[in-house]
Amino acid sequence: MKFEGVIFDLDGTLVNSLDDLADSMNSVLQNAGFPMHEVEAYKYFVGNGIRNLVRKTLPETVRNEENVAKYYKQMTDAYRENCLVKSKPYNGIVELLTELKSRNLKLAVLSNKVDELTQKIINALLPGYFDMALGVKNEEHRKPNPAGALQITKEFGINPAGIAYLGDTATDMQTAANAGMYGKTPADLLTIL
């Protein structure tokens, strides 16, 4: 199969950001007097954006929309300050991106993280590799809604079937399917190019 472009998910695919997410949310929970969670537990809280992470980590007794909104604001403030403390690209990602660029493929990032933080992380940790990076600007367009993926294809001038979509969650695979793209994990990419 011949691809002209690749769209990557950010967290859990390109960048290991689990510690910074966990540390930021645990600081919010601790300040509110709520129980904190082990870093490993955050693997099950991430993938659908910070608002959903906040919802999942709050004690059930206080898990209402008013509190989710309140602690979401605190979490985004904490994470904005701490998103680059421990986060780093996974082993082999820089080499993979270098190889893809040498093949003249268009590369993009599509994340359920807010756009401001998506840009900040990509610019700091993986500068110069991506033709486009897109985070959430509108909650309605959160993955698995294919709107962001289709926006990227339009910007690239590539048919969705000519895009490989790489991610680490079922949400990513559903986004690929919804957009008419080929969904895989990064480890599988070089075997299909």
Image (cartoon, rainbow, N blue to C red):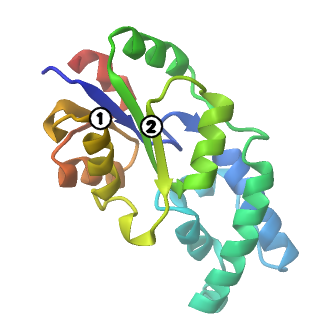
Q: In this rendering, does residue 64 appear at all?
A: no
Quadrant of residue 142 in the image?
Answer: bottom left
Q: Earlier in the sequence, mark 1 or mark 2?
A: 2
Tell me the kind of residue under disc 1.
Phe
> In which quadrant of the rendered image does the C terminus lie?
top left
Kind of residue sitting beneath label 2: Met
The residue at which mark 1 appears reads as 156
Residue at mark 2? 132
State the count of labels.
2
Q: Image point 30% across, 25% down: which residue?
A: 188
Horizontal and vertical percent position of residue 28: 79, 70
16 on left or right of 30: left
Going 63% across and 51% down the picture, which residue do you hit?
117
Q: Is residue 62 left or right of residue 162?
A: right
Task: Say if mark 1 contacts mark 2, CB within 8 Å.
Answer: yes
Res. 158 image quadrant: top left
SS at circle 2: strand
Q: Secondary structure at mark 1?
A: helix
Real-space CA distance between mark 1 and mark 2, rounded to the nearest whole angstrom: 9 Å
State the image coordinates of residue 60 (x, y, percent, origin top left).
Answer: 60, 85
Residue 63 or 83: which is nearer the viewer? 83
* Residue density around tag 1, few if under 14, some if 14–19, many if 20 or more, within 10 Å: some
- Between residue 90 and residue 126, name the one nearer to us: 126
Above or below residue 193? Residue 155 is below
